[in-house]
Amino acid sequence: MNDGQNQPQNRLARRKQRTRGALLQAAQAFIAAGKLNAPILEITQAADVGMGSFYNHFESKDDLFAAAVTDVLDSQGDLLDQLTETLTDPAERFACRYRLCGRLFRQQPQESRIMLSIGLSLLSSDRGLAPRAKRDIVAASNAGRFKVHDPDIALAVAGGALLGLGQLLLEQPDRDDAHATDEVARDVLRLFGMTARQAQQLTSQPLPDIAASDDAGSAA
């Protein structure tokens, strides 16, 4: 009896989830394309949902766009956690995540355009790479791996360099993203007090396969 009652509720929940997901995906495409002034009707048409359905999930376009950005940041954060879960050295974890993020500019172009559209406000976000990077910086400093006196300044330096790298890779599609990312990562590690040899060692480690993790997540 209860199973029969739950089935319509489950179908309704799945339908609402699909609608919300379609709106988020449409919003992310608009943000990545720089179409921040698009009317709600245009977004709902792209998502193939009705205007009424929109207001069942979001109060305004700003509300939708904020949720779309949060969704991207959470997805990236989850991916980085998954790829670096076995690393125990905070300096190695920071370097690995930094190098992975640099490569994501090419492997996840839409998400990366969204990141670049947000700009430096990413550094104060409690989602995505920023809070993870700050935790790693603090932990590596406490462990004597980094020589950092102000974690917020260190995060600003590292984040600013990463965003600058992302813009460069966007403007220069022929540039080797892996080489450029590792070069920037080495410079950041040197600024954090590591020797050239230590920085070279950390940026020469093999990286987890981003594509394989993305495929596994999609299959799930």
Image (cartoon, grey):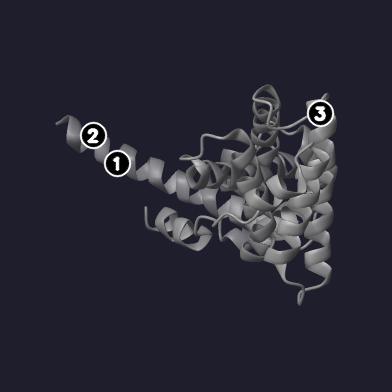
Q: Residues within 10 Å of mark 2 (few under 14, many from 20)?
A: few
State the SS at label 3.
helix
Q: CA distance from mark 2 to mark 3?
A: 52 Å
From this view, report whether residue 172 is shown above or below residue 8.
Answer: below
Q: Depth-wise, is mark 2 or mark 3 nearer the camera?
A: 3
Q: Which is nearer the N-term, disc 1 or disc 3? A: 1
Horizontally, is 141 left or right of 72 in the view? right
Q: Which residue is mark 3?
A: 152
Three-letter amino acid code of the residue under disc 3: Asp
Q: Which residue is mark 2?
A: 5
Q: Where's residue 207, x and y in %?
A: 54, 56
Q: CA distance from mark 1 to mark 2?
A: 6 Å
Confirm or deny contact between disc 1 and disc 2 (CB under 8 A): yes
Confirm or deny contact between disc 1 and disc 3 (CB under 8 A): no
Specify whether residue 219 is in view: yes
Q: Residues within 10 Å of mark 1 (few under 14, many from 20)?
A: few
> On residue 8, which mark appears?
1
Specify whether residue 68 is in view: no
Q: Which is nearer the N-term, disc 2 or disc 3? A: 2
